[in-house]
Amino acid sequence: MDLVHVAPLVTDLEGELLAAYPGLTRRLTLVLRDSGDAEDIAQAAFARALEQRHRFRGGDARSWFYTIGLRLAFNELRRRRPNIALTIDHEPSWAMTSEPDLWRALGELEPRQRAALLLSVLDGYTHEEIGRMLAVRPGTVSSWLSRTKTRLRDVLGDDHDG
């Protein structure tokens, strides 16, 4: 009888993960600044989420999935940081033709701050939700977002207050 009730949860979770997968890949591309690496990490996050589905306690599956993906991405960045120096040659052509100033400004942000900005602006998560995803206090998220938005306004030449 329990299997009857568990099977729909697994199917629903898998469906939610599949629906969230493209968004995670886009976020990871901006965090990692490499679409190939982002796809690899998104695949690893999907596999990890399926392996760990017993740990999902309900609620926002996308947030849970993004948490897994972002933590894998941060681990990858820590692992490779001493070995990679980004130059203009590493910039993707799609970013450089559409929004080069924005791409470069985002690239200057610390990866967890960049992730917080994306989760707030693009996904509408609260500071508390982002804090849980990134394993920091909501006040830290607030501080990051304030400094990040100020930095982006300065770099992008926006003279407006706010």
Image (cartoon, rainbow, N blue to C red):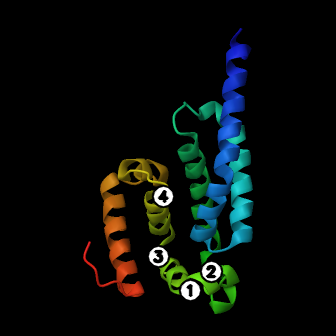
Please give the label number shown on residue 95: 2
Q: Position of residue 24 (x, y in %)?
A: 62, 56
Residue carrying label 1 = 100
Q: Amino acid at mark 1?
A: Pro
Real-space Cα separation, disc 3 to disc 4, in angstroms: 14 Å
Q: Residues within 10 Å of mark 3 (few under 14, many from 20)?
A: some
C-alpha distance separating marks 3 and 2: 16 Å
Label 1: how many residues lie within 10 Å, few (<14), some (14-19) or many (20+)? some
Q: Which mark is residue 119?
A: 4
Kindly state the secondary structure of the residue where label 2 is placed.
helix
The single residue placed furthest to the bottom in the displayed view is: 88
Q: Of the residues tagged 4 and 2, which is closer to the observer?
A: 2
Q: Earlier in the sequence, mark 1 or mark 2?
A: 2
- Residue count near mark 2 (Cα–Cα under 10 Å), binned few <14, some 14–19, many ≥20: few
Residue 109 circle label = 3
Q: Give how far across and how far down residue 58 sits, in percent.
A: 54, 31
Q: Nearer the viewer, mark 3 or mark 4?
A: 4
Find out whether the residues at labels 1 and 4 contact each other: C-beta distance under 8 Å.
no
Question: Which quarter of the image is occupied by the C terminus?
Answer: bottom left
